[in-house]
Image (spheres, rainbow, N blue to C red):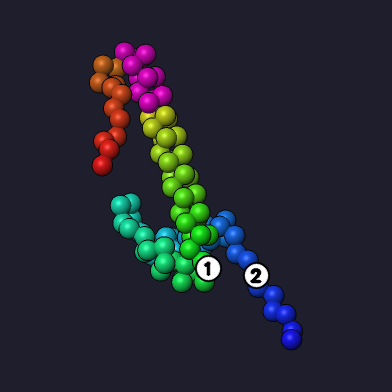
């Protein structure tokens, strides 16, 4: 009986597919992704790689948000040093 080679798809490959999916669907901030089951079926993988990819995506987005907040805070601090009284530090509201 001939053996059939099965290509294992890694979570990083699923992450790339997930990025492409988000871009192709023009998902906007706040819009929900399809369920893990639906994504797994669409990408033809099991749920664990999808779960890992979604977790990685959340980590990447959190890192981007924190970097943007740090940059904004640095700009406000610079304005405050220049004597701009309207420069205040504010934090995004939790939802």
Position of 49 compared to 5: left or right? left
The relative height of residue 75 versus residue 31 in the rendered view (above or below) is: above
Residue shown at the point (29%, 34%) measured from the top left: 92
Q: Residue at x 33, y 51 (%)?
A: 29
Q: Can residue 65 be found in the magenta stretch?
A: no
Residue identifier under label 2: 7
Quadrant of the rendered structure where residue 12 is? bottom right
Foreground of the two, 49 or 71 = 49
* Disc 2, SS: loop
* 82 magenta-colored: yes
Residue at 47% in and 44% down: 59
Left or right of 14 on screen, residue 73: left
In the rendered structure, which segment of residues is drawn in magenta? 73-83
Hey, which quadrant is residue 10 in on the image?
A: bottom right
Quadrant containing the N terminus is bottom right
Percent position (x, y) of residue 91? 30, 30
Q: Position of residue 71 (x, y in %)?
A: 42, 30
Q: Is residue 32 above or below residue 69?
A: below
Residue found 63% across the figure and 66% down from its top: 8
| Local SS, label 1 | loop
Residue in front for this viewpoint, 72 or 38: 38
How far across and how far down the image is residue 56, in percent?
49, 49
Residue for badge 1 = 45
Give the mark count: 2
**Residue reaching furthest front?**
1
């Amino acid at each position: 009986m001939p053996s059939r080679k099965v290509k294992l798809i890694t979570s990083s490959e699923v992450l790339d597919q997930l990025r492409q999916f988000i871009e192709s669907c023009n998902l906007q901030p706040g819009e929900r992704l399809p369920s893990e089951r639906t994504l797994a079926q669409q990408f033809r993988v099991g749920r664990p790689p999808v779960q890992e990819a979604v977790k990685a995506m959340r980590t990447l987005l959190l890192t981007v948000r924190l970097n943007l907040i740090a940059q904004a805070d640095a700009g406000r601090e610079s304005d405050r040093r220049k004597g701009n009284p309207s420069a205040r530090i504010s934090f995004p509201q939790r939802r």
